Image (cartoon, coloured by chain):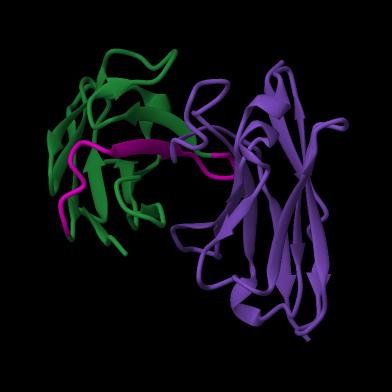
Amino acid sequence: EVVLTQSPATLSLSPGETATLSCRASQSVSTHLAWYQQKPGQAPRFLIYDASNRATGIPARFSGSGSRTDFTLTISSLEPEDFAVYYCQQRSDWPPTFGGGTKVEIK
Amino acid sequence: EVQLEESGGTLVQPGRSLRLSCTASGFTFGDYAMSWVRQAPGKGLEWVGFIRSQRFGGTPEYAASVKDRFTISRDDSKNIAYLQMNSLKSEDTAVYYCCRDTSGPGDRDVDWYFDLWGRGTLVTVSS
C-alpha cells in the first residue's frame, strides 16, 4: 500500500503567517490526493481534492499543489480557526491511505 | 442539515462483537458509497472499509486488518449504514467515523474521497 509521510509533525506559527505542509508518497499517486483538517473532538473536514481543487465552501487561503510523490498544502495568512491537525490522503492505489498528520499550533 | 451521526460505541471485551450505526440526514443516502474510517487514540486515520450504493450492487470491501472480522451493510430505507465488528481485539480500540464518498449519483461506484464525516463513536476493547 502507498505510505504517505507528512512533515513536519508540528508547525508552530502565529496568526497571519503562512503555513506550508508537506506530504510525500512512497510511489506516484499522480494528483489523486486530498487534504483534511481535524480539530480536537471534531470530525475531519474535506479541504482539497485532486491535489489542488478546493472543496465546496473552503476559503481561498487554503491551496494545494504537487503531483506524483510530492504535495504541499499552503495556508496563507493563518486565521485562529486554522490551528488544527491536517492529514493528506491518497486514492490512487487501493486501499486508500492517510498520512500521519501535521499539527499546526499557535506559536 | 446535511450530516452523519455514528452511534453504538462502548467498552467491550476482547473477542466479543459490536455493531455501530451511521445515520444520515439531509441528503439522498442511497446515492452514495459510504466508508468507515477509524482513529486509534493519539494516532492517525485508517480506512476500514466501504459499501457501494445499491446502484452498483451494494457490495462492500475491507482493509486487510479487518477483513473476515468486520462486515459493512446498509439500509437505505432507514438511511443507515452499519459496521458489524466481530472477534474484537485491543488494537481495534479507536474512534470510528462514517464518511460519505464523493462519488454520489455520478457514474463511478466510488471516488475514494470523503466529503462528509460524522463526529465519530468511541470503541474501547479491553478486559
Q: Position of residue A35 (x, y in %)?
A: 34, 37
Specify the segment rendered in magenta: A27-43
Q: Residue at x 68, y 74 (%)?
A: B69
The tally of labels here is 0
Please indicate whether residue B22 sits to the left or right of residue A103 in the image.
Answer: right
Where does residue A97 sit, x and y in percent of width and height?
38, 55
Of all chains in the rendering, the one displayed in purple is: B
Quadrant containing the C terminus of chain A is top left
Chain shown in green: A
Look at the magenta stretch and give its main secondary structure.
loop
Q: Which quadrant of the view contains residue B58?
A: top right
Q: Residue at x 56, y 24 (%)?
A: B104
Question: x and y percent of residue B60 in the render?
Answer: 63, 53
Horizontal relation, residue B109 to residue A106: left or right: right
A59 in relation to B68, above or below: above
At 17% across and 28% down in the image, what residue appears? A18
Residue A33 magenta: yes
Where, by quadrant of the figure, is residue A17 drawn?
top left
Task: State the residue at coordinates (69%, 67%).
Answer: B70
| Up/down of B53 relative to A17, above or below | below
Q: Is residue A20 visible?
A: no
Check the image and name the residue furthest to the right.
B78
Query: Where does the image place residue B127, in percent across and percent down from the top left?
Result: 78, 86
Q: Quadrant of the N terminus of chain A?
A: bottom left
